[in-house]
Amino acid sequence: MQNQLDSHTGILAADQDFVEFVQDLTPGQPATIDGVYGSCCALAIGSALTLLHTQAAESTVALVVVPRPQDVDKMCDDLRVFLDCSPLPYPLASSSGTGVQHSDDEVHGQRVHLLKRVANRSGALEIVVASIASLLQPVPSIDQLNSQHVHWQAGSRIDLESTVAWLLANGFHNTSAVQLPGEFSHRGGILDIYSPEWESPVRIELWDDEIESIRQFDLVSQRSLSNLSEISMSSMRSYRKGDAYLTDYFETDDCTLLVEMGAIDLQGREYLKRSAEFEKCHGLRDVIKRLTEQRCLLLNALGPGDLGRVYRFKTESVDRFHGSMEQVRSEIAALPETHEVAIACTTAAEAERL
């Protein structure tokens, strides 16, 4: 089903009106795609970004904005169906401001990891999915992250005492054995560190003051996952500093896609009303203004009004198939031969029976 559905982006790529609509996207001049219901929204996004990335001379980075934090994972799941890449969820940080909980450290680390990934640009199509609330929260600038970071390379020398002092001064917790992001452990010639930016902890093995090896390892089995030639990380103190915008990491020719603009506006206002750190948040109008400075698409099921050029999806709902398997087969067979039919089943066994 995956291969069958991700080919559907080619249907829109064959629509000359859609191709011209996407090609004519201009920074600072939002355009609207109307009539996108349910997963059709992900299909439209996937088709548009595939076209933009194919035509781009350099890497393409896109930011998909959804109204609610709980919409992020669903949008990522939908996009995986239509795209041959994994969207990057941008999490909403806690508004407690305490900075003492490991979960808070982990979320901030995930945000910083994504910021660096966008800034470094791999050349592939990168898609970030974020709620409007997460965009209202300030982020450190790339200069702040780079000015408070450490870098280790296999074969280089390290002052272990000053390294431990740096870790303690920059928000890491010293433990007997690392278990959670934000912890480190030192015993003999082994230094284990679990930065919230990393997916797995890292073990640095020393021979006197020389780094003999750098390895990612599994927390449970303690087995090595991969050998690294070098690794770097930023200070955890820098995670909560700065007043930059996520959009500061994007370039003018990148693309922003706002899903249900009316709901985005409403949810943004609601978040600012209940946030414990309202005074630290960016203004909603300012964030939306910055989002529309790139090439921008507004996607609505039924928009309150059109902004800029408009491409209308011709979609309609269909009834669910129900009853016996023979009845389902009969209903499918009755469909006109001019239609291509894709049937979504909850299990592989159901697909086999059909």
Image (cartoon, grey):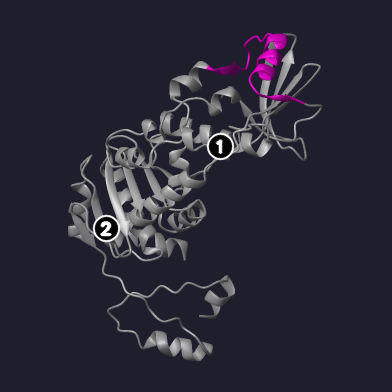
Q: Nearer the viewer, residue 294 or 188?
A: 294
- Disc ID at residue 7: none
- At which x and y percent is residue 170? 63, 20
Dot 1 crowding, Cα within 10 Å, few <14, some 14–19, many 20+: many
- Compared to 283, does 301 lie above or below? below
- Pinpoint residue 175: horizontal percent, then vertical percent: 78, 26
Q: Is residue 145 left or right of residue 189?
A: left
* 104 inside magenta stretch: no
Residue at 20%, 57% (x, y): give it. Answer: 310
Residue 130 screen position, x and y as percent = 45, 46
Along the line of sight, which residue is nearer the eye, 284 or 71?
284
Residue denoted by label 1? 110
N-term mark: 1 or 2: 2
> Is residue 39 at all visible to an observer of this figure?
yes
Boundaries of the magenta span:
148-174
Residue 346, quarter of picture: bottom right
Note whether 212 is above or below 70 in the view shown: above
